[in-house]
């Protein structure tokens, strides 16, 4: 869902399809299978047990937008029906 929202609302005309990375603190194959069953995209899921799950390095944190900024931008973006021609 999030990748489709980025492609529809934030991607430019020269951008390729958005890709995503899912890092899970714990891996549950059953939950993952049901959650991703309808996805036609190749997706890999892995359990991540590194420092990134507890502490994001400052240089990375500074380069990423805050979740509040992303939510605000998505809330202000037109929906696909608002941008399609009649």
Image (cartoon, grey):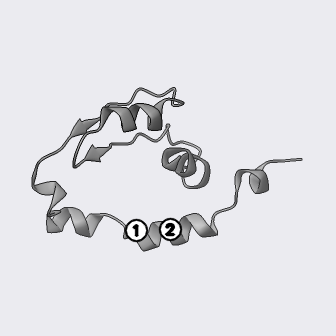
Residue at disc 2, secondary structure: helix
Residue visible at 17% across and 62% down?
56
Residue underneath mark 1: 67
Residue underneath mark 2: 71
3D distance between C-alphas at marks 1 and 2:
6 Å
Indicate whether 83 appears above or below 16.
below
Q: Is residue 81 left or right of residue 18?
A: right
Residue visible at 25% across and 40% down?
27
Q: Is residue 35 left or right of residue 85?
A: left
Estimate the x, y position of residue 55 in percent, counting from the top left.
14, 64
Residue at disc 1, secondary structure: helix
Residue visible at 46% across and 34% down?
34
Instruction: Choose top left, top right, bottom left or bottom right for residue 76.
Output: bottom right
Indicate whether 22 appears above or below 57.
above
Asked whether 49 or 29 is in front, the reply is 29
**Residue at the right extreme?**
86
Estimate the x, y position of residue 4 in percent, counting from the top left.
55, 44
Instruction: Choose top left, top right, bottom left or bottom right for residue 14.
Output: top right
Q: Does the CB distance between marks 1 and 2 fall below 8 Å? A: yes
Residue visible at 26% across and 46% down?
24
Asked whether 24 or 62 is in front, the reply is 24
**Residue at the front extreme?**
30
Asked whether 14 or 7 is in front, the reply is 7
The crowding category of the residue bearing disc 2, from other C-alpha atoms within 10 Å (few below 14, some 14 to 19, many at least 20), is: few
Estimate the x, y position of residue 70 in percent, counting from the top left.
47, 66
Question: How many discs appear?
Answer: 2
Indicate whether 1 appears above or below 60.
above
Q: Is residue 28 left or right of residue 4?
A: left
Estimate the x, y position of residue 54 in percent, counting from the top left.
15, 62
The crowding category of the residue bearing disc 1, from other C-alpha atoms within 10 Å (few below 14, some 14 to 19, many at least 20), is: few
């Amino acid at each position: 869902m999030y990748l489709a929202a980025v492609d529809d609302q934030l991607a430019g005309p020269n951008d390729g399809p958005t890709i995503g990375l899912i890092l899970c603190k714990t891996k549950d194959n059953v939950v993952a299978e049901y959650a991703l069953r309808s996805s036609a995209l190749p997706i890999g899921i892995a359990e991540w047990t590194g420092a990134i799950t507890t502490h994001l390095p400052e240089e990375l944190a500074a380069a990423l937008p805050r979740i509040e900024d992303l939510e605000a931008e998505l809330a202000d973006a037109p929906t696909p029906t608002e941008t399609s021609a009649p």
